[in-house]
Image (cartoon, helix red, strand yellow):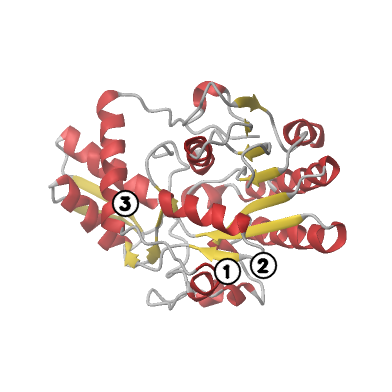
Amino acid sequence: MDRGERIVICGAGGFIGGHLIADLRRQGFTKLKAIDIKPFDRWYQIFPDVENLSLDLQHLENCRQAVRDASIVYNLACDMGGMGFIEANKALCMISVLINTHLLMAAREAGARRFFYSSSACVYSHDKQTDPNVAGLAEGDAYPAMPEDGYGWEKLFSERMCRHFTEDFGLITRVARYHNVYGPHGTYDGGREKAPAAISRKVAQALLSGTHEIEIWGTGEQTRSFTYIDDCLFGTQAIMASDTITFPINLGSSEKVSINQLVDIVESIAGIKLKRRYKLDAPKGVNGRNSDNTLIKKMLGWEPSVSLRDGMERTYRWIYDELKSGRSKDVAVNMA
C-alpha cells in the first residue's frame, strides 16, 4: 500500500481494529481514519494523530461519511462476542449485515481501491465440527452451508456480497476467515469475551481473590485453535495486499487444544491449580474446530506461528494487570 493513501478502519475501537490502527501507525502510514460505534472513552486503543469518528455504520449515510476519499477500507465492525453472546443474540448478529452491505455500497461510490472483510470460522458447516478430534477445516468445507446460526450466516452472506461486488462492480475485495483471535487490549469481561480472555480473567480473579476454583463451560473437551493478534495483523495485511487471494481464506493457528488444555496453560502461567466446576448447560459451541492452513501456506508461504503458550503468557499478564489496577472498560454494551 502507498503510505499516502487514505486508509479507513471500521471497528477501530474494538480489539483487532485497534491493533490494526496501531500497527499501521508503526509502519508510517499517516492518512488513517478510525471508525467505531462506541464513544471514544470505550475504545481499547485510540490515537490523537488519527482521524477518529464515532459512527453507527448500520446506516448508509454514516458509511458514506466514513469512507469518503478512501483508497483502502478494512471492515472489522460487527456486533459480536464469544459463544455466550452469539447464542443469545442471533438477531443482533444478523443485523451486522447492514454494516458490510452499506460499507460496500459506500466504498464503491467513493472509488475505493480495495476492501477487506473480516469473516469467521463460524461460517463452516456444523456437520463437520461434531468431533473434538476434527481435522482442520479447509475453505471448501463452508459448503453445503450450515454455519453457526445467526452470526455464521451473517458472515457467510457478507462473504458472498463481497464476491458479487467484485464480479459486478469491479471493487477488489479480500476476505479472511478468522479463527478465534486473542491478545491484549480486548474484551475480557461483560459477556462478549472469548475463551482465552475469559479463562485468563477467571484464573486471575481466582489468584487475586484467593478463591481457588474456576467455572468451565461444557465438559472442557471441546477443541479449538486460537490465533494471536500479531499473526492476525500480519495475515490480514498480506491477504489485503495479495493479487492472487481472490477468495475467502483461513487466517488461524493450526495448534488445536481442548478447553481443559487451555486452562492448564493459563494455570501454569499463573502458577496456580484450581478446582474445576463444569457448567454443562452453558453455551459451548461446536465440539471441535481447527484451521487447515494448506491454502494460506501455498498462497503466502506463511501461516500463523505464535505458540499458544507464548500468546497466552502476554494475554494473561495484561488481563491480570488490568484487573489488579481496576482499569477495566468491560461492561457489555449492545450496539442496538
Counting every numbered tag in the picture gives: 3
Q: Secondary structure at mark 3?
A: helix
Please name the residue that numbered disc 2 is placed on: 247
- Inter-mark Cα distance, 2 to 3: 28 Å
**Looking at the picture, how far across and down is residue 280, in whole percent?**
36, 59
- Inter-mark Cα distance, 1 to 2: 15 Å
Q: Residue at x 42, y 70 (%)?
A: 288
Frontmost residue, 58 versus 234: 234
User: How packed is label 1: few (under 14 Cα within 10 Å), some, or many (20 or more)?
Assistant: many
Please name the residue that numbered disc 1 is placed on: 124
User: How packed is label 2: few (under 14 Cα within 10 Å), some, or many (20 or more)?
Assistant: some
The mark that comes first in sequence, 1 or 2, is 1
The mark that comes first in sequence, 2 or 3, is 2
Q: Residue at x 21, y 58 (%)?
A: 264
Q: Report the amino acid beneath label 3.
A: Gly
Which numbered tag is attached to residue 311?
Answer: 3
- Inter-mark Cα distance, 1 to 3: 25 Å
Q: Is residue 273 left or right of residue 68?
A: left
Q: Residue at x 25, y 39 (%)?
A: 317
The mark that comes first in sequence, 1 or 3, is 1
For residue 36, say whether it is visible.
no
Q: Quadrant of the C terminus?
A: top right
**Looking at the picture, how far across and down is residue 306, in whole percent?**
34, 57
**Looking at the picture, how far across and down is residue 118, in whole percent?**
60, 53
For residue 330, say whether it is visible.
yes
Q: Is residue 105 left or right of residue 228?
A: right
Q: Residue at x 32, y 60 (%)?
A: 259
